[in-house]
Image: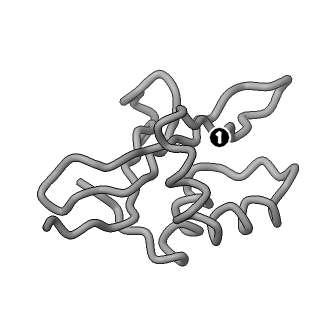
Amino acid sequence: MSKKNNGFLGYYRLDGAIVHEQDSLEIGRFFREGGCRYEFSVVWEVLGQHNVPCLRVFNDAWQGLYSEHQPLLKTLAENDGKDLQIDELIKILKSLGYKECK
């Protein structure tokens, strides 16, 4: 049986160079050997004059999000209306025990 961890992958701009057109974090249940059981993402979109986070969840991740990520959802709810940036969300994820996947 493969060992699974809650983890995240980051796709974002580094040192002014655009690595991806849109900042995003892929969050989910990842296998140590590679691959994942499911994933969902937080993407940053321009809304008005602000870069704001948006939670994107496809239907194959709804159960996993609900059953395994309640502490994350609670923390996001506590930050409702705040324009958290990618570095702030990474700190939150790490504080909740999520591992950065490479």
Work out which quarter of the rendered image holds the C terminus and state it: bottom left
Identified at 58% across, 42% down, the residue is: 42
- Please name the residue that numbered disc 1 is placed on: 55
Residue positioned 21% across, 46% down in the render: 35
In the rendered structure, the answer to whether residue 44 lies left or right of residue 9 reads right
Q: Is residue 89 left or right of residue 21?
A: right
Q: Looking at the image, which is closer to me, 35 or 66?
A: 66
Quarter of the image for the N terminus: give it.
Answer: bottom left
Q: Is residue 27 above or below residue 23?
A: below
**Residue 8 picture quarter:** bottom left
Q: How is the image coloured?
A: one colour
Answer few, some or many: residues within 10 Å of disc 1's Cα (few below 14, many 20 plus, some between 14 and 19): few
Q: Residue at x 56, y 63 (%)?
A: 67
Image quadrant in which you'd find residue 65? bottom right
Asked if residue 79 is positioned above or below residue 45 in the image, the reply reads: below
Q: Could you tell me residue 41's position as x and y percent?
A: 52, 41
User: SS at mark 1?
Assistant: strand
Q: Residue at position x 37%, y 49% from top? A: 9
Query: Where residue 55 sits: x, y (%)?
Result: 65, 40
Q: Is residue 51 above or below residue 83?
A: above
In the rendered view, tell whether residue 68 sits above or below residue 28: below
Q: Amino acid at mark 1?
A: Leu
Residue 33 shown left or right of residue 9 in the figure: left
Q: How many marks?
A: 1
Residue 11 in percent (x, y) is at: 40, 39
Q: Nearer the viewer, residue 12 or 53?
A: 53
Q: Position of residue 85 (x, y in %)?
A: 65, 50
Say left or right for 41 vs 33: right
